[in-house]
């Protein structure tokens, strides 16, 4: 039986991963979720599983060495899955230091704590103990509009403070693997979407604004391309890499679902019109006229795209959820969880939204 220390499990991908793991393994695993509960962390995301006897939540900052060491001392952790991070590019442009603190320093603390707990007197590591660092394709920089993909061999060329901090954290993991033979893997995934995503990111923000008849802000010309992956497919990839991937390897996750931002917005509007019953008053709000072109993001990467050849050929993982299906599932989830959206958009969200969008 594996005992997982999951960091950032109250966030978007982390909470989907925890749900996925309990659905898959039931009582055959134990999960300790360590999360600081920043604005992005929300225990509501985990309310269906919070009473399981094989689940424990610890509120802690990953930069707090003592708190992390205490967890390794109390629990027989043999798997770390490290999601905790500051994750939003626009915020990183406003406050880069927080990103360096959590993403770089926090990762160093996680690596060091796992190394201290798992290292044997001869410098090797306890057998079958593994660390998986969850990262992003944004570390590779930006692709030309007319071609090319990110491969595991693509040189790192991050542009935003967010991607620079994630690239730094990846480099630290690589340094631990190279220097100490620390048992780890890195996954670099493309843009995720799905349930529990905080509405600062494009897809939930557009769904939420459209339902309320609020403007749909499109940065620049709206033709930047992202390669979208349904979050459950990402959760599955992480588990498969950790259990069947070659140790010390990086795997890119994503694939062949490239869309321009403006296309995404049109798909969301069309799907909302299709799914909302005639009698629903929100139907009247959903209109193409809400689309508003605003000042571009500084240093906006043009295109991201992954060719998932390595993870497919070595591990047999492929994206399973087609975008048309994934976006319907996502919208259905938001319809059924209006309260969740209300709760996360009350309070500080309004302040964030006004400061981020009023001068665009
Ligand atoms: P998120 O912002 O939704 O969640 C981050 C979680 O980390 C939150 O629960 C937050 O409370 C927690 N956290 C932040 N700082 C912390 C700290 N100092 N100590 C402990 N917990 C802290 O992010 P997400 O979208 O779920 O992304 C999770 C991971 O996946 C990140 O490492 C991100 O870089 C990576 N990633 C995200 C995407 C994407 O599309 N969202 C794509 C590829 C990779
Ligand atoms: P985002 O969801 O922030 O993810 P990332 O920047 O990590 O790729 O943004 C996805 C794309 O959507 C990106 O090209 C920026 C664009 N975007 C908008 O046009 N308007 C918005 O309000 C937001 C949040 C993003």
Image (cartoon, grey):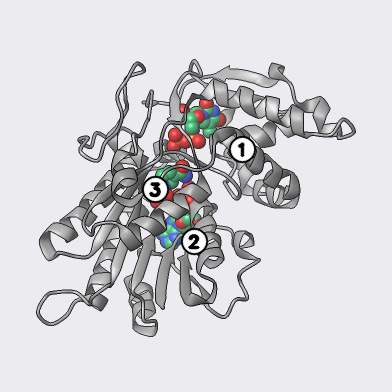
| Front of the two marks 1 and 2 | 1
Q: Secondary structure at mark 3?
A: loop
Q: Earlier in the sequence, mark 2 or mark 3?
A: 2
Q: Which residue is mark 2?
A: 9
From the Cβ of disc 1, is ligand 1 less than 8 Å away? no
Residue sitting at x 55%, y 21% = 262
Find residue 326 and report its horizontal and vertical position in percent: 59, 40
Q: Earlier in the sequence, mark 1 or mark 2?
A: 2
From the Cβ of disc 2, is ligand 1 less than 8 Å away? yes
Left or right: 287 in relation to 144:
right
Q: Secondary structure at mark 1?
A: helix
Q: What is the CA distance from the residue labelled 2 to the residue labelled 3?
A: 23 Å
Find residue 152 and report its horizontal and vertical position in percent: 24, 41
Q: What is the CA distance from the residue labelled 1 to the residue labelled 2?
A: 25 Å
Q: Which residue is mark 1?
A: 325
Nearest the eye: 10 or 193: 193
Q: Secondary structure at mark 2?
A: loop
Q: Name the image quarter holding residue 213.
A: top right
């Amino acid at each position: 039986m594996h005992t997982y220390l999951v960091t950032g499990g109250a966030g978007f991908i982390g909470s989907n991963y925890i749900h996925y793991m309990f659905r898959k393994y039931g009582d055959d695993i134990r999960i300790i979720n360590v999360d600081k509960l920043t604005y992005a962390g929300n225990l509501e995301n985990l309310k269906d599983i919070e009473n399981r006897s094989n689940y424990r939540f610890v509120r802690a900052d990953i930069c707090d060495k003592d708190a992390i060491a205490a967890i390794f001392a109390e629990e027989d952790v043999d798997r770390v899955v490290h999601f905790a991070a500051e994750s939003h590019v626009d915020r990183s442009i406003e406050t880069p230091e927080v990103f360096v603190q959590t993403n770089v320093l926090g990762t160093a603390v996680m690596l060091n704590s796992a190394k201290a707990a798992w290292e044997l007197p001869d410098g090797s590591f306890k057998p079958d103990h593994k660390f998986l660092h969850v990262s992003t394709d944004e570390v590779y920089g930006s692709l030309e509009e007319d071609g090319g993909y990110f491969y595991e061999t693509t040189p790192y060329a991050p542009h935003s403070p967010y991607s620079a901090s994630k690239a730094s954290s990846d480099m630290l993991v690589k340094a631990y693997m190279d220097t100490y033979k620390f048992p780890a893997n890195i996954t670099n995934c493309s843009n995720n979407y799905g349930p529990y995503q905080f509405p600062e990111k494009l897809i939930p923000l557009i769904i939420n604004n459209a339902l309320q008849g609020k403007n749909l802000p499109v940065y620049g010309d709206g033709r930047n391309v992202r390669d979208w992956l349904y979050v459950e497919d990402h959760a599955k990839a992480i588990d498969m890499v950790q259990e069947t991937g070659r140790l010390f390897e990086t795997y890119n996750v994503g694939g062949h679902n490239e869309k321009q931002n403006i296309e995404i917005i049109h798909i969301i509007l069309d799907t909302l019109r299709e799914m909302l019953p005639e009698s629903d008053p929100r139907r009247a709000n959903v209109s193409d006229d809400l689309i508003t072109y605003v000042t571009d993001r500084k240093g906006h990467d043009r295109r991201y795209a992954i060719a998932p050849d390595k993870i497919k050929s070595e591990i047999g993982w492929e994206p399973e959820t087609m975008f048309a299906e994934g976006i319907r599932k996502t919208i259905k989830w938001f319809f059924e969880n209006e309260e969740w959206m209300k709760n996360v958009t009350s309070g500080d969200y309004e302040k964030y939204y006004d400061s981020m969008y009023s001068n665009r």
